Amino acid sequence: MPSKTSYFKKEIWKQAFRSSGWIGIGYFLALLFVLPLQVIMVKTNPEQFNYYQDRADNLFYLNGEVQSILILTVPVLAAIFACRYMQVKDSADFIHSLPLKRAQLFYHQFFIGYMMVLIPVLVTGFILFIMYGLIDVDFIYQHEDIGNWLYDTLTLVTFMYSISYLIGNLSGISVVQGALSYIVIFFPSGISLLMIENLRMLLEGFSANYSAVLSYFTNISPIYWIFEISYQSNFEIVTWYYWVLSVVFVALSLILYRIRHIESANQAIAFSIMKPIFKFGVTICFMLLGGVYFGSIQGQYVGWIMFGYICGAILGYLLAEMVIQKTWRVFHQWKGFVIYFGISMLIVLSLIFDWYGFETIIPDEDEVEGIFFNGGGLVHTYDAEGNQVKPNITDPDLIQHVIDLHEYIVSYDQIGQRSDMMHTEIYTNIDIIYHLENSSKVTREYSIPVIKESEQYLQPILESDDYKKSSMPWLYQENDDVDRISVNGFNGSQEVTDQETINKIVAAFKKDYLEMTYDEMSQGYFKNRDSKTIEFELETRETKFLPLLDSYSRVLEVLKDEDLDRGIIITPEDVSMIAITNSQVNKEMFYELPQMEEIDSNNWMLVEKSEQIEELMKLNEDANGTWEVGIYGPMNDRLIRRFQVSEDQLPSYVKDYFE
């Protein structure tokens, strides 16, 4: 009578556990320290007990960063050792000589590695469950939290393990398997970010702020979810597709393993058909990275971007060849590179010269249903729903003004070119999103100088009530009540909690804000930024920090009536000194000036005479001015205001001083 042969091969499991069992043991001990032991430590420490009682709402709050690192590293390590038998020549020859089908070998090795991450998580969850019944741990977690932690952790470690195991079947070297595993995990968000940044540099008006593609690929990457769950409360992971992808990766691993040659051990890429894909994938990533690096460092000049493409492509191609051939003697392999680089440069040139007409697309007025417009200045307009931005301009006249502005930007190439310069008083960022009648959108983003030529287009838009109300929706929505107001002057702050006074200030602020001029909106945020501000705290605990402008007559009147105007109105008697400079000095020096032992008299003029102080305080701010003026208060010569003026405003004695 023939004996039955067991599908389970005990000796294979024993041998595998001897070589990789330490991974499971180490993972279990690590989880034991970061969760059950941490709970006990918190329980016995009164200070930590109070801290976690107020803040902890899931098990990822306990050493969340450590848990994230374990999820990222342990499954990949387990997959590397599970695939090790097919990547070492002697081991591959021996194990494949056994009277076992490849499917049997695959399942044994796959599940041996998977147990190294599965069992520690399940045992830790069981210990947490037992602890919940034995000691009072309600302040940190409950039964539901254990289930959520188990599900989320198993989802992420299973996905990480399955994708790394798939890479192990594609590679014949363990180090390459580990590196490629993380490259593939980061690839969706990484390549989309690189492509978007390159498009932003090459295409005038391209906007990445509202890119659904970047958001989509970022959310696909498990890296995003792994770290988000450790930082955010009540965070729910979109996980179903991770299980689907895990099953797909395991099935692909089995298919590849069935056709994998034993001789591919010690080869970086086990399948010949994958070598050109790997080679050109590495090359294009390095090429895009080189373009972004040199473009951002050198101010997005096309010449430097092209230089970055060339350097990055050469470096990436050579590195890929070195990995595949396992030698540095690859400098004669140029045929494939020339073909690849020629095609890539053709695509780049098509973007630079805008063969697709992207930069000149401007919808007609009758095609536009509404526009979301975001202009720089006092505030920025961001929709609460993120990328689903709603129109804030629907009036036909205002729509035409936006189209006119867009046509002006397109017609003058240098106006709309983006640069990585710091945002200053003379530059503003413009976002335009057209909502068309056919439900499609046209999105553009520009950085334009605030000059007279552009002011005639910006002014009617920024001064419109529709734009102003949309730029501060919390101020004009009845459900966003203000709980507290802080009035900050140059000699301290005053807090307002009386609801009647708060209502008076808010009502006055609403009216004053709607009467703001274009100049105040484009320069107001910077004016008085060192002294007068007003802070609104909403019911949602959200804080709005805004400048308190001299033109807010109604607000200033309310503050005066309520005796809240201390340090708001600066008089000559409040000023101890005025500093003037015409050099491009570091603006932080205005704060350090009173404490400096030696002051360069060639670059600075210090005014302390009362009649001169009174005269200089009447100067009008000019954002395009080349002279900087700093006003200092009596309290330890504290800087209370800094602004720019044009030279034609300066008194003669100031000009004479610098001659």
Image (cartoon, grey):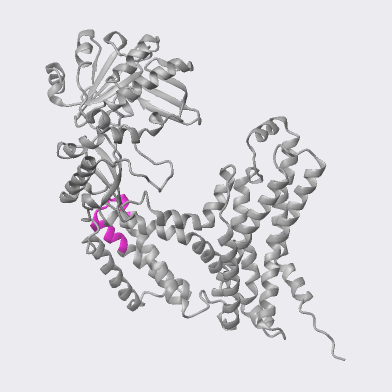
Most common secondary structure along the magenta stretch: helix
Q: Residue at x 26, y 17 (%)?
A: 578
Q: Which residues are magenta?
A: 294-309
- The one of 86 and 397 positioned closer to us in this rendering: 397
Q: Is residue 131 left or right of residue 286?
A: right
- Residue 25 at least partly seen: no
Q: Residue at x 84, y 90 (%)?
A: 2
**Quadrant of the snapshot with the N terminus:** bottom right
- The one of 62 and 210 positioned closer to us in this rendering: 210
Question: Residue at the bottom extreme?
Answer: 1
- Residue 19 at least partly seen: yes
Instruction: Identify whether 542 is placed above or below 337.
Output: above
Q: Whole-percent x and y of residue 42?
A: 72, 37
Asked if residue 350 lies in the magenta stretch, the reply is no
**Quadrant of the snapshot with the C terminus:** top left
Q: Residue at x 61, y 67 (%)?
A: 80
